Image: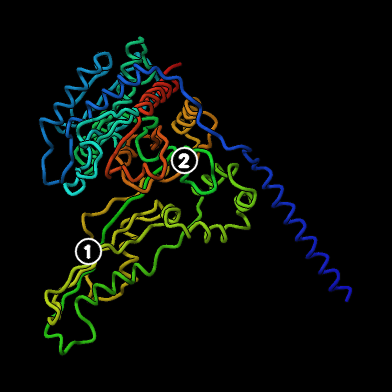
Amino acid sequence: MRILKTLGLLLLLAVVIIGTVMVTRTFMLLPAGEARVLKSAELNDAEVRRIGENLAAAIRYETISHDLNIAPDDAAFKGFHKFLEDTYPNAHRVMEREVVSDYSLMYRWPADEGTTKKPIALLAHMDVVPVPEYGLKDWKHPPFHGVIDADGVLWGRGALDDKGILISLMEAAERMAASGFTPDRDIYFLFGHDEELGGDMGAVKMAEILKARGVQLAWAMDEGSAMTDGIVPGIKSPVALVSLGEKGSVTLKFSAEDEGGHSSAPKDFTAASLAAKAGATVMDHPYEPILDEHLEEFLFAIAPEQPFINRLMIANLWLTRPLMEAELSKSPTVAAFMRTTTAFTMMKSGTKVNILPQYGEAVVNYRIHPRDTVESVTERARALVDDERVKISNLGGGREATSMSDPMGEGYKAIEATIADEFGDIPIAPTLTVQGTDARHYDMVADGVYRFMPFVFKSEDLKRIHGTNEAVPIAVIARQVDFFEKLMRRSASE
């Protein structure tokens, strides 16, 4: 009896100790108090309008990436090059410009001789996605007219992705060059012309040129994530998300052949059923969601903004990790950050209802987490299907996930400090970009590659990227100019 009492006391003591540790760790993540808001900016109305008009003019150049088999519109791209020269004479006076693959632009703003600091690079792309004919009727203003409405909103393809960033960079360079600024390290502007098609002739070629010349960047920054408002669950204030890397992708085709015949005398399988079963098998065996060290860094960054119970869970991952993994993975959006995703997207087979198909195929698209590779994804699919009647082929070769850059690196710290300077005391968190960008091609020539757009996205804004009624307030573009000027001055001056 005494032993049972002793065990009971020890158990109670253990519970008290664990509870005390959990609460203590929770209070180490101090709550933010009231929801934090963006710092207001003092903007000159005439300057805002001038910047907006320049972006509107840029949108009118239909620099569309249609398809790998369709050549770029020579007049549109070269017209846009001339527009940049004419509009930003001071920037072109101090920067060296090189045209790559006929249409991409590589600018170098040279430092004074004798610098020992590694260069930095700021990326954007000048190409845009097409506007589907069937969606034209739903645009408030024609997508390539660059209309600024009475509320100061600029409508047009490329306003968000990605001419808004490109013009903001050129505006900042023009302003700085006019003021007599000289960087103490080389600054590169790398503007691709085929990002929407993968960047093989633009970013890839520019990265190869840098490598051949022995240029190693301290860091590079591109599009890919931004500030969000009302998107991250449990947080009332805007959150600045800075991506450390991005997912890869591969598309696998599962195909099967059979002799066919009449449907009145079927075997226990058809080419269609074999292919469909293979697609369904991999879809029914998704990758396990993992709360890894990168997601952990994100959670700790946003924890002060969370309610007490959420902070309790985050502060005590040593105990709550399995529960947190299960809870976070309930959201498809969050789960996409935690694992390689599997999507059965296409199926093709059959010619007539009473004919057994001689061929069937299922297509599955994977978005690859940095933990995995194209090869490991393919081999896992092969092992899951385990049927010699099904041929598994890789469509297009695939793209590996990038490495994850250091959230303590020079580039991250510069971006983080500039966000705080321009936008105020808002939470800043490292994350992973799930879509592809040109940034991935610069891994081989940069110590760190980061992705951030100085723009506040609400959930409705996300639908506008590549969608109908792409638009941006011109005051937002003017503020982006301020951000990039501060970033460059912070990073490239004594």
Tell me the amino acid under the disc marked 1. Answer: Ser
Task: Give the distance between the C-alpha atoms of the residues marked 1 and 2, in whole angstroms.
Answer: 41 Å
In this picture, is 115 found above or below 451? above
Q: Give the percent coordinates (x, y) of residue 286.
A: 39, 65
Q: Residue at x 63, y 38 (%)?
A: 33
Q: Residue at x 23, y 18 (%)?
A: 87
Label 2: how many Cα within 10 Å (few below 14, some 14–19, many 20+):
some
Q: Give the percent coordinates (x, y) of residue 224.
A: 36, 40
Q: Give the percent coordinates (x, y) of residue 257.
A: 16, 75
Tell me the amino acid under the disc marked 2. Answer: Asp
Q: Which mark is residue 229?
A: 2
Q: Which mark is residue 14?
A: none
User: What colouring method underlies this structural image?
Assistant: rainbow
Image quarter of residue 270: bottom left
Relative placement, left or right, of 358 versus 251 is left
Quarter of the figure with the N terminus: bottom right
Q: Nearer the viewer, residue 37 or 434?
A: 37
Q: Nearer the viewer, mark 1 or mark 2?
A: 2
- Asked which secondary structure carries label 1, the reply is strand
Q: Nearer the viewer, residue 157 or 106?
A: 157
Q: Residue at x 73, y 55 (%)?
A: 19
Please say if the residues under marks 1 and 2 sit with CB atoms less than 8 Å apart.
no
Work out whether residue 119 can be spotted: no
Relative placement, left or right, of 281 versus 26 is left
N-terminal of the pair, mark 1 or mark 2, is 2
In this picture, is 365 found above or below 67? below
Question: Which residue has dot 1 on it?
Answer: 393
Q: Nearer the viewer, residue 201 or 154?
A: 154
Image quarter of residue 322: bottom right
Q: Residue at x 28, y 40 (%)?
A: 469
